Image (cartoon, helix red, strand yellow):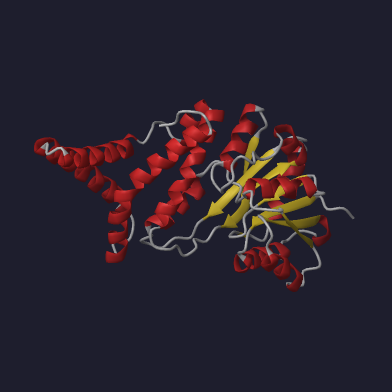
Amino acid sequence: MSPVVSIVIPTYKRPHLLARCLHALAHQQFPKDRYEIIVVTDGPDDSSQQLAATLGITTPVVQVLALPNKKGPAAARNLGWRTARGRLILFTDDDCIPHNYWIEAYYRAYLQRKSEEAVYTGQVLVPCSQKPTDYEKNIAWLEKADFVTANCACTRAALERVHGFDEAFTMAWREDSDLEFRFINQRVPIRFVQQAVVTHPVRKASWGVSLKEQKKSMFNALLYKKYPSLYREKIMKRPLWNYYAMAGLFVLAIMAAALQWKIIMLLAFVGWLLLMAQFTIKRLTGTTHHPAHVMEMIVTSMLIPFLSVYWTLYGSLKFKTLLL
């Protein structure tokens, strides 16, 4: 009997996370012969291949595919859904844990509508500490997002209508918003299914993780180029002028110091210091005030504006648009 539901999971060399996700999917309250699991590795990944072979899951069928080289999760998902046999394609990530009735909730919603072109999204739960870190707080925004590939379902017809994911998004950033915006433009309805729940635990992050995250800003420019109105409506209503101001004032202070313009140097430095302090306090609001975390916020708050502006302008040049 052919599966009616296919689940696509992009991954890359994270077997411990993938094992947890597959375990949850193998124990779904849904007929095991009616769904399949397709794991797609973002490049050659022997550890994921070996994991799938050693887990001993025979039903549902687990298939592991591999991209020939790293292209990003958008490309991995495209390979997955185009290989899938089900009419309804469910997407989640290797670091997520679908709840027991996840498939059942989406499939029931699909049967109720019986629409050839339909998209569904569900709840994402992000367990956080009572006093989270800045990184935990940033991940928790997933709970409020309109549409994320950590927890969504699309009919094959809907994906074909918009030609799947845009593989120009080569990192895990904005590729889900791009897909959402194309559904909106093509008037494919996106319905919320409250009973379709996944938990997204926050992984332990290295010190200064927010600095590494700034590279993703380049893909904001690509999304803005494709959908300027939707970008301003749903992603960012206005440019991050405080970042530009902080970077500009600091550069001005250095230049003024070199030219011995002491008053300009002092004014520029004080202006930078005030904006940086305001930014740091904003990031610390509602988070842990452990001394190590406070120090991390101070140091990274000094550097984030420069990195964000750099990668935003880099993306603007790369994708031939102007995003400030």
Give the quadrant of the C terminus.
Answer: top left
Residue 53, given in percent of the width and then of the height, sits at 76, 70
Residue 238 sits above or below residue 74 on the image = above
- Residue sitting at 32 percent across and 36 percent down? 244
Residue 182 sits above or below residue 98 on the image = above
Give the quadrant of the N terminus.
Answer: bottom right
Please name whichever residue, 11 or 114, is drawn nearer the observer in this view of the structure. 11
* 297 sits left or right of 109 in the view: left
Residue 240, given in percent of the width and then of the height, sits at 36, 36
Please name whichever residue, 149 or 239, is drawn nearer the observer in this view of the structure. 239
Asked if one can make out residue 140 in the rendered structure from this viewpoint, the answer is yes
Residue 147, given in percent of the width and then of the height, sits at 57, 42
Residue at the extreme left = 263
- Residue sitting at 53 percent across and 33 percent down? 319
- The quadrant where residue 272 appears: top left
* 250 sits left or right of 39 in the view: left
Residue at the extreme front = 259
Asked if one can make out residue 98 in the rendered structure from this viewpoint, the answer is no
- In this rendering, the count of numbered labels is 0
Residue 52, given in percent of the width and then of the height, sits at 73, 67
